[in-house]
Amino acid sequence: MKYWLMKCEPTSYSISDLQRDQTSGWEGVRNYQARNFMNTMAVGDRAFFYHSNAEPPGIAGLMTISKAAVADPFQFVDGHKYFEPRATLDTPVWVTVEVTFERQFDEIMSLTQLRSTPGLETMEVLRRGSRLSIQPVTSSEFNLILKINGVS
């Protein structure tokens, strides 16, 4: 099993939206490294839902990868903001995974709190200039964050 941190602006889609919907495609990723990470995700992998460009930015909850990478359907929709003219059904450029809601944390675990937590010093989201929307998380980082948030 692998662990991930997946960012989304809560004004676009939030952990509360995922709780309401229970499952959702994680479409619209348009960064090659993030896409490559999505291609390695497996059903059962777990991920933190991170509210980016928010006040405060931070980890809002937990979700599970419930469907492995498939072609992002929006890349084929001419005129859509995620349209990709190079993509074909045989050779898509972008992918999406399906995520399923696990839980919302009682409080956002803010970026400030992440920075000040011993054991998280090397977490990817804390690295200077780290703007990737999807990032790997180590098992020790994952388990520490769960423990801090009272999740077993």
Image: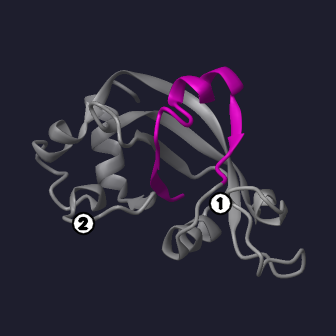
Looking at the image, which residue sits at the far front? Answer: 79
Q: Which residue is drawn at 69% across and 69% down?
A: 94
- Image position of 8 (left or right of 82): left
Residue located beneath label 1 in the image: 42
102 part of magenta stretch: no
Residue 71: quarter of image: bottom right
Q: Residue at x 40, y 63 (%)?
A: 132
The amino acid type found where label 2 is placed reads Gly
Q: What stretch is highlighted in magenta?
A: 1-27
Which of disc 2 and disc 1 is earlier in sequence?
Answer: 1
The amino acid type found where label 1 is placed reads Ala
- Image position of 64 (left or right of 141): right
Residue located beneath label 2 in the image: 129
Helix, strand or loop at label 1? It is: loop
Residue 48, position as x, y percentages in the image: 44, 43
Between 76 and 58, which is closer to the camera in this rendering? 76
Residue 31, position as x, y percentages in the image: 52, 70
Q: How crowded is mark 2: few (under 14 residues within 10 Å), some or many (20 or more)?
A: few
Between 65 and 33, which is closer to the camera in this rendering? 33
25 part of magenta stretch: yes
Residue 81: quarter of image: bottom right
